[in-house]
Structures are given as C-alpha cells and as structure tokens.
Image (cartoon, rainbow, N blue to C red):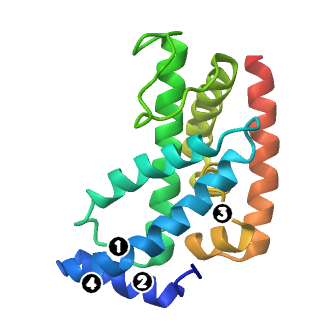
C-alpha cells in the first residue's frame, strides 16, 4: 500500500473530527500504515525478534488514538506528533510497570493484547530517560519534543521539522544538543 498524501490525510482527519464516520473508514488504513512504520522504526533500536512488539505497540497506540475522535486534528503532522507522544507513554508505562513489579512483576505475560514485556534493564533505562526528558522539557520544551518525535516516534529529521514547523537544521541542532544534555544527565544517575 502506498502512503496517502499528507493533504489527503489532513482532509480526512478534519472530516473525521467533524463527525464524518465515512472519512474514518478511508483514513484508518492510511494512519494504521503510518503508525506501523513509526513503531517499526522505534523498535529497530531494540534487540532482535521484536516484530510482535512493534505490532502490539502500534495496536495499543491505534486504539487510544481512535478514541480521541474529538481531538480537533489540525493536520497530518499534528496527528503523528500526538501518535509519537502516545507511543512514548505506552512504552514508558510498560517500563515503569516492569520496574515496580506491577501486574505480576517478573511473571511472564501471556496476553498478546498487552504491550510486550520490556526487560528490567531496558525498563530502568527507559524510565530514567523519561524522567530526564521530563526535566529537559521543563527547561527547553522544543528540544524535548525533538527527542520525543525522533526517538519515540521514529520520525526523520524532515518529518520532525514538519511537525514542529521549524527547519531541518534547527531539528538537527536541537537533536544534537538534547542528546548531549541527556547523556550528561543520565551519566550522573548511573
């Protein structure tokens, strides 16, 4: 399936927000395909063999986003920025649950509808990253959004620039500075 043009997705999002149920029927395959791409790009940074995890991540994000039909989507970029933030929340919530031992702690999760198990080491790293990213957002919200879009959303520099309505050069500058700041802060916590 070829990706739907940005303008078409924007028009369908606006029609769906306006109550057009038929618009959602045409929109669903396009956004689901894009969400799968985003999840796959994020999960590529994980250890091998996570195809189901990417699927679980995108399914959970998709279900949450579909319930937000009255979100007043501005355009394609707005929708996918919220999607990246949703994926971040899902991954961090799963990691926090693993670290704190909720939902059975170390017990194996069999329900395929749930977000996939994240190893405890990876979970701690993800929770630490989220906490540090929250601190960065308090100081420089744009840099934090760049990290969120690139790392959690898997967006390219150009896609992040479109979402944030800034130049790709500004995204790269923010990305480099944010990574350096995060690396320094995370090294302080061990």
Kindly identify which residue carries mark 3.
155
Question: Label 4: how many residues lie within 10 Å, few (<14), some (14-19) or many (20+)?
Answer: some
Give the mark, 4 or 1, whose residue is nearer the N terminus.
4
Q: CA distance from mark 3 to mark 4?
A: 25 Å
Placement of 14 over or under 68, stated as above or below? below
Mark 3 falls on what kind of element? Answer: loop
Marks 1/2 in contact by CB < 8 Å: the verdict is: yes
**Residue 15: mark:** 4
Tell me if residue 131 comes above or below residue 176 in the rendering.
above
Q: Could you tell which of marks 1 and 2 lies nearer the N-terminus?
A: 2
* Labels 4 and 2 touching (C-beta < 8 A): no
Instruction: Name the spot of residue 187 as percent of width and height, x first.
Output: 80, 24
Residue 7: give x, y in percent of width and height: 48, 90
Secondary structure category for the residue under label 4 = helix
Instruction: Return the mark for residue 10.
Output: 2
Q: Which residue corresponds to the image point at 25% horizontal and 75% vertical from the top-left? A: 17
Precedes in sequence: disc 3 or disc 4: 4
């Amino acid at each position: 399936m070829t990706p739907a043009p940005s303008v078409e997705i924007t028009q369908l999002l606006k029609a769906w927000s306006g109550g057009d149920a038929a618009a959602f029927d045409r929109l669903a395959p396009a956004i689901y395909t894009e969400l799968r791409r985003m999840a796959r790009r994020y999960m590529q940074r994980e250890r091998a063999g996570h195809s189901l995890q990417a699927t679980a991540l995108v399914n959970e994000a998709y279900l949450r986003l579909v319930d937000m039909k009255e979100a007043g989507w501005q355009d394609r970029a707005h929708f996918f920025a919220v999607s990246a933030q949703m994926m971040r929340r899902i991954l961090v919530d799963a990691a926090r649950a693993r670290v704190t031992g909720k939902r059975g702690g170390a017990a194996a999760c069999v329900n395929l509808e749930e977000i996939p198990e994240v190893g405890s080491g990876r979970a701690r790293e993800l929770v630490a990253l989220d906490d540090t990213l929250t601190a960065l957002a308090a100081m420089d919200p744009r840099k934090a959004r760049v990290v969120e879009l690139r790392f959690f959303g898997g967006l390219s520099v150009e896609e992040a620039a479109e979402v944030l309505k800034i130049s790709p050069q500004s995204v790269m500058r923010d990305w480099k500075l944010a990574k350096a700041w995060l690396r320094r802060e995370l090294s302080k916590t061990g």
